[in-house]
Amino acid sequence: MNIKLIKGFTLIELMIVVVIIGVLAAIALPAYTDYVTRARRADAKDTILTVQLAQEKWRANNSAYTNAMTNFGYAGDAAQASADGHYQVTVTGASATAYTITAVPQGAQATNDGECANFVTNESNSETISGSGTAANCWNR
């Protein structure tokens, strides 16, 4: 009696592997997207901090805060892109004693980040958001 050994994979074994990979991808992709969204929030916070420091430096040398982003080294006075381009940052309501800085998400960040959405702060460092989450979670995560 001559028995032949057949080497290789059956179609069922291959399909089981494909299903396992599909299940892992279905779990991993949303988690990865959420992680990237949360990580990109640092871009807004970094740019806001940079503009806040520039405002305080400007105010130390002038009689009032300014809305003009050109005074901080930006190309124009309108909304300016954050360092990595995930947010548009504007300064509004500048006076001798106050200003407001707003970072609005752009592109995929705007689509994926309903929890935090816009980051808003002012001269007294009052940190708020316009999303469905809490300001404490969004500013500290």
Image: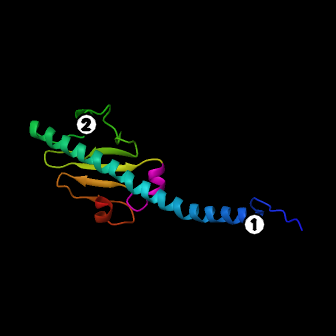
Residue 51, percent from left and from top? 24, 43
Residue 140 vertical placement versus 61 (above, below): below
What secondary structure is found at the residue carrying circle 2?
Answer: loop
- The answer to which of 37 and 20 lies nearer the viewer is 20
Whole-percent x and y of residue 63?
10, 39
Q: Which residue is mark 2?
A: 68
| Amino acid, disc 2 | Ala
The residue segment tinted magenta is 108-117
Q: Is residue 3 left or right of residue 55?
A: right
Quadrant in the picture for the C terminus: bottom left
N-term-proximal mark, 2 vs 1:
1
Q: Name the residue located 14 percent from the left edge and 39 percent from the top edge.
A: 57
Whether residue 130 sits left or right of residue 108 in the image: it is left
Q: Which residue is mark 1?
A: 12
Dot 1: few (<14), some (14–19), or many (≥20) neighbours within 10 Å? few
As displayed, is residue 45 above or below residue 115? above
Callout 1: SS:
helix
Label total for image: 2
Going by the numbered disc 1, the residue's amino acid type is Ile
Residue at 32% x, 31% y is 75
Using the image as rendered, state which of residue 5 and residue 23 is in the foreground. 5
Q: Alpha carbon of mark 2 to alpha carbon of mark 1: how far?
A: 66 Å
Q: Residue at x 77, y 63 (%)?
A: 10
Q: Position of residue 81 (x, y in %)?
A: 37, 40
